Image (cartoon, helix red, strand yellow):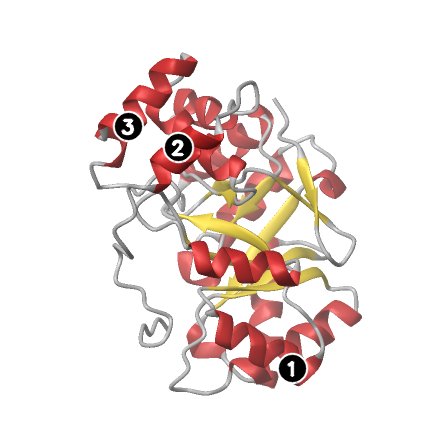
């Protein structure tokens, strides 16, 4: 199964679901990513700080899927904020990925105390203009931070990848994204290591559609038009996670799942969180 794709504001496209790769950094990880591509995943999400760009690159080399059909996303680490630092860091990532171009490059965290994310954004604009990056965006940015980028450069990030799941639906930020044609990406879409998939409302929605709780939650993301990036090293679960386009949730079901909202669960407040 191949997921449908959304158009991005810059003319590029992004699949409606992707494969997260955090922790997939050894031979088993390479096998999982290679298999994921064979199973139909076309959006592969990595980061400098995941330490697995080489593994992702090896998986890409092993696949017979055309490179132009893949969307490879990676992220700038906090320790490399700054104009020149961003350019150098990107080249390190591109070398490890062994790619001529990167499809989507994101600032991983804003680190407002450092005050350099605008410099990094200007560098990313330069990388895009040179054709080394197809699309540029951010991760874990607030509406205020996004506004600063837009007002300062006139260039709107095409995506903002943020913590998003039924416990933290991010209604206000998603509304801001919609207003500015920014695509929302969801990290930790299944709120792993929590009781989310055991919630009665999730179980009821899943049973009503004859799907698993994980599929019900991933379909909830699809209904929000957010792009979830679930990770799994298990082939059956990867296929299950991708198979969420044959059913739809009602507005009432979406609202019932969204009502589980209780706030951020990972402690990653963009105004204070620092990750280098």
Residue 70 visible in the current orientation? yes
Q: Nearer the viewer, residue 231 or 170?
A: 170
- The numbered dot on residue 255 is none
Q: Secondary structure at mark 1?
A: helix
User: Does dot 2 land on a helix, a strand or a loop?
Assistant: helix
Q: Which residue is mark 2?
A: 217
Q: Earlier in the sequence, mark 1 or mark 3?
A: 1
Residue 2 image point, x, y percent: 64, 27
Write down the quadrant of residue 17 in the picture. Answer: top right
Instruction: Compute the Cα span from label 2 to label 1.
Output: 35 Å
Residue 151 disc label: 1
Q: Label 3: few (<14), some or many (≥20) within 10 Å? A: some
Give me the residue at 39% from left, 49% from top: 169
- The image quadrant where one finds the N terminus is top right
The answer for how far apart the CA atoms under marks 1 and 3 are is 41 Å
Q: Quadrant of the C terminus?
A: bottom left
Q: Where does label 3 land, which residue?
A: 201
Q: Does residue 85 appear in the picture of this structure? A: no
Which of the marked residues, 2 or 1, is nearer the chain's N terminus?
Answer: 1
Residue 125: x and y, percent?
70, 74
């Amino acid at each position: 199964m191949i997921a449908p794709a959304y158009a991005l504001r810059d003319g590029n496209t992004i699949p409606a679901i992707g494969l997260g790769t955090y922790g997939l950094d050894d031979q088993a990880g390479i096998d999982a990513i290679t298999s994921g591509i064979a199973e139909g995943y076309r959006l592969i999400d990595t980061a400098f700080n995941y330490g697995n760009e080489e593994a992702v690159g090896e998986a890409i080399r092993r696949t017979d899927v055309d490179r132009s059909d893949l969307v490879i996303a990676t992220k700038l680490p906090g320790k490399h904020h700054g104009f020149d630092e961003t350019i150098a860091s990107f080249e390190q990532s591109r070398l490890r990925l062994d790619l001529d171009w990167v499809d989507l490059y994101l600032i991983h965290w804003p680190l407002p105390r450092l005050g350099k994310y605008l410099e990094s954004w200007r560098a990313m604009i330069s990388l895009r203009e040179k054709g080394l990056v197809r699309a540029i965006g951010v991760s874990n940015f607030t509406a205020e931070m996004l506004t600063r980028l837009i007002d300062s450069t006139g260039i709107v990030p095409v995506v903002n990848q943020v913590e998003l799941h039924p416990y933290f639906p991010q209604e206000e930020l998603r509304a801001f994204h919609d207003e500015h044609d920014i695509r929302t990406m969801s990290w930790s879409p299944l709120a792993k290591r929590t009781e989310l998939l055991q919630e009665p409302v999730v179980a009821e929605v899943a049973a009503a559609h004859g799907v698993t709780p994980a599929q019900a939650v991933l379909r909830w993301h699809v209904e929000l038009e957010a792009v979830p990036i679930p990770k799994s090293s298990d082939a059956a679960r990867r296929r299950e996670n991708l198979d969420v386009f044959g059913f739809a949730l009602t507005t009432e079901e979406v609202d019932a799942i969204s009502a589980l909202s209780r706030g951020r669960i990972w402690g990653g407040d963009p105004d204070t969180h620092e990750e280098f």
